[in-house]
Image: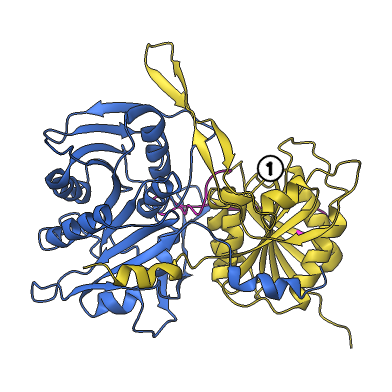
Chain colours: A yellow, B blue
Amino acid sequence: MKKKKPLILVSNDDGITSPGIAALIAVAMELGDVIVVAPDKPQSGMGHAITINQPIRITAVNLYDGVKAYQCTGTPVDCVKIAIDKLLTAKPDLMVSGVNHGSNASINVIYSGTMSAAVEASIDGIKAIGFSLCDYSWDANFEVVKPYMKQIMESVMKNNLPYGTLLNVNMPVPKMGEIKGIKICRQALAKWKESFDQRTDPFGRDYFWMTGNFINMDEGNDTDEWALKEGYISVVPTMFDLTDHRRIGLLNQWDL
Amino acid sequence: MKKKKPLILVSNDDGITSPGIAALIAVAMELGDVIVVAPDKPQSGMGHAITINQPIRITAVNLYDGVKAYQCTGTPVDCVKIAIDKLLTAKPDLMVSGVNHGSNASINVIYSGTMSAAVEASIDGIKAIGFSLCDYSWDANFEVVKPYMKQIMESVMKNNLPYGTLLNVNMPVPKMGEIKGIKICRQALAKWKESFDQRTDPFGRDYFWMTGNFINMDEGNDTDEWALKEGYISVVPTMFDLTDHRRIGLLNQWDL
């Protein structure tokens, strides 16, 4: 009897025409049947935004041979929601998001549309992975990391990943052409120190561009930032329950 | 010697003209000096989105007597970032966000612009609270909950709230005019089952409105959903480290 191929849903936040999603689709096609639902334009930094005050449109596009693909006017999370409700005929065995052009390690996970798409799939009970390459350039080289992506996707499909957990995978630009391996990590404690670039428009009014500096406050050698700096791929088990369970006892001591 | 009044930063996601933020400002003014930086339009469902591909503008507005207030073209998180970098001359003693018109309990926390503004302040080391009233109507009655909001804000300023933790406060519409009290809770395990409303525009093309049904999968009587249903205000300690520390051991057993 022929074994049914796994069904893999693909999305991202850089948009459906990005080289990163093309690399991810290529790997996914080696493992199963692929359906792509991705934003029709860059949606970086959209976090877990959803579109509730405007309608959304989806259009079938013929971009990747042998793959059903749809571009969507909404956010990355919208893409996953509309895929589940309107485009998928069966529950996917895996959802993968990316490959993001740029790091989503440490605090970046919270701003990332790529990761939020994976989080949304995970909330819906689909095994999910967000992939990011620590290279912002559009012509980044994804070839070296493809075998690792395949290995991680296979592992997730094969193993038990409990409901409530997804993976945040960040991949370094290999030094000397080599990746050292894969490390299971925690998210480094870090933040962006914002520095808005203030300018004046031709009409004399001020406007601001958001820029900032990344500040890693975490020296731990069990963090994603450490692993990436050392040339490893970082895999962080990530969750969408934001309860800080450690502090329930503390708050119960307050006089509330 | 006169004690310096605490400095309180206020934002929200329903926009600077919403009745909810007016209620929050009124309470904050009883406790300290207030500065408001809030979106110039509704930004519900924006999650932790930031504006990186467009400039942002801020405009001083004279909406609330005795309060410095700025409206911002960006997202709730943008408001907090630009407040910190460009508008504040000292670190606030407290940041409060809301009062949101509608619940941000359980999974709603992840989609909420109101909560994301508070999360952003918290990442920057500012004690932060997001307040929401479980009433979506614009003319919701905030009077009954004001004393509780004041009590919670005073408690946060007085007590030690460790870095990494903020509060997600949801308030029920009081039955018979009474709130039963305050409960420290965890976030209920719940999700939205999306149901897109498909329509056809005058040009024959489909478009979709996001709608959905809230599904509470959690019967626990230690959850925010339970507390709200019973008539209590729920206070959930919330965190921005998304690492699922429980699963690091499990992943280390995989053959990655």
Residue A55 shown in magenta = yes
Q: Quadrant of residue B90?
A: top left
- Out of B106 and B251, give the one closest to the viewer: B251
Q: Does the image show residue A256?
A: no
Q: For numbered disc 1, what is the local secondary structure?
A: loop
Give residue A172's position: percent from left, percent from top: 77, 46
Q: Residue at x 34, y 61 (%)?
A: B168
Give residue B62's position: percent from left, percent from top: 17, 29
Q: From the viewer's perspective, is residue A46 above or below residue A186?
A: above
Residue under pointer 1: A102
Q: Residue at x 56, y 51 (%)?
A: A189
Question: Crowding near pointer 1: few (<14 within 10 Å), some, many (20+)?
Answer: many
Chain letter of mark 1 equals A
Q: Which corner quadrant holds the N terminus of chain B?
A: top left
Q: Residue at x 32, y 68 (%)?
A: A251
Residue furthest to the front in view is B1
Give residue B84's position: percent from left, percent from top: 38, 34
Position of A95 with respect to B89 (left or right) is right
Position of B209 with respect to B147 (left or right) is right
Give residue A47's position: percent from left, percent from top: 52, 50
Q: Which corner quadrant holds the C terminus of chain B?
A: bottom right
Q: Does the image show residue B158?
A: yes
Q: From the viewer's perspective, is residue B165 above or below residue A20?
A: below
Q: Looking at numbered disc 1 in the image, what kind of residue is underneath it?
A: Gly
- Out of B189 and B124, give the one closest to the viewer: B124
Position of A218 with respect to A102 (left or right) is left
Q: Which residues are magenta?
A: A44-67
Magenta region, main secondary structure? loop
